[in-house]
Amino acid sequence: MFLDRKSLWPHLRRWEERAADRDGPFRLRFGTLFVADADAARDILVDSAGDYLSQSGFFRLGPESLPPAVRGEASRELLRALARHDLPASFDLDSALGEVRDGRGRLRHQRWGVELVRRYFAPVIAHRSHTGINALVDAYVTSSVVADDIVGHVLRRSHRTVPAIRAGLADQLGRLPAREGGTRDLVDLVLGLPGELSPGDRAQLLQRLVLSTVGFTGVALEWVVMLGVQHGYDTPDVRQEQIHRLVREVLRLYPTAWRLIRVAAADHDIAGVQVHEGEHVLIGTHAIHRSAAVWDRPLDFRPSRWEQPTDDQRRSYLPFGKGDGMCPANGFAVKALEHLGHLILRTHRGHVRLRTRKPHVRTLLAPPAGWTRLVPAPAPER
């Protein structure tokens, strides 16, 4: 639709400005209806969901979502898999940082967060005994999540890697039986899904779950650390509740999932605007999160606003969507961001260098090009 551009940030800002001047939804140049009102958005996602095709960004095959009952059980299995692992206790931050730094010791934006979160969630994605699958997941993260969804290299070259990775995953999954005794990882999850799913279908679902688990969380972690360093959170005295507010403000001002798209299943109205069956509706999360009608000084980075948020602010906060199509990374992603953000900022001092001040927007809303350098904090004096 519009992801053929290198970065969409100028378009997002323009849509925000148009939303501020209009009372209700409006159509973009290419015809899609743009919604920037929280009440209308929640009506689409929750209250009037029957007017839209059942949709999931991750539990789907091509454009078709899995049945709601299957998606619900898959989400529960994902939580069970997470519960089997003590990720904070098993994660070696120093080792992971060493592996994701470049040759000059820098953490390159639009890359390092995804690679670090891939290591953090490694036990949940695939058991270490799945050597071939883990190698293919690493290749997918590098060649698709980073190169395509974040940076947009696919615009400059023919992109043949992802189908080859999917074929490799299908071959690996096709050799494995469904595991008995509970879901251990995402591999077990996709193998255990009911229905007439081919190994290729299950490989596609595994790729989408990796994007959900690693891509969105990794990009958000870069924002948390970069803005935390810039605003003085990199101190041994930083408290967990400060990081909690920091994460919430990051996801407000720079929501990784900057838009939610729904397809109308029948003719109906949205806030007085006629929508026809088959029409696409784009909910601008970024615009809702930056509305001056809801947020005081909305473009300012102010984590303190989360000390006492208003009811309107709570209703207007949609970083993971709402309703049946809500991102499956919702709860555990926030916990991971708070844990990793606190661990990194409490134990390191940082320095940020940017080549531009504009965020980079493709499938995901990523930090500006540049890098962050972290050095271990000196031991406290006794």
Image (tube, rainbow, N blue to C red):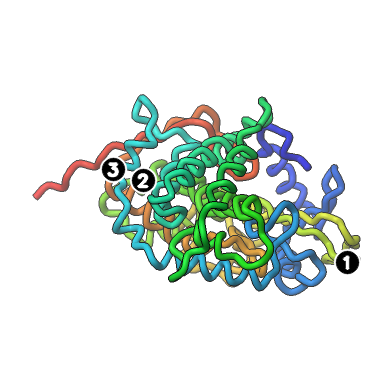
Classed neighbour count for the residue bearing mark 1: other residues with Cα under 10 Å, few (<14), some (14–19), many (≥20): some
Residue 59 % position (x, y): 64, 60
Q: Hey, what amino acid is under mark 2?
A: Gly
- Which amino acid type corresponds to the residue marked 1 in the rendered image? Ala
The residue positioned 51% from the left and 68% from the top of the image is: 77
**Disc 1 marks which residue?**
266
In the image, 8 versus 95, the foreground residue is 95
Numbered label attached to residue 232: 2
| Residue that lies at the very extreme toward the left in this rendered image | 382
Measuring from the top left, give residue 367's x and y in whole percent: 53, 39
The residue at which mark 3 appears reads as 94
196 relative to 230, above or below: below
Q: Mark 2 to mark 3: distance in Å?
A: 21 Å
- Is residue 298 shown to the viewer in this render? no
Identify the image quadrant of the N terminus: top right
**Position of residue 194 measured from the top left corner of the image (x, y, whole percent):** 63, 67
Check disc 2: other Cα within 10 Å, few if <14, some if 14-19, many if 20+. few
Q: Judge left or right: residue 372 versus residue 219.
A: left
Quarter of the image for residue 251 reads bottom right
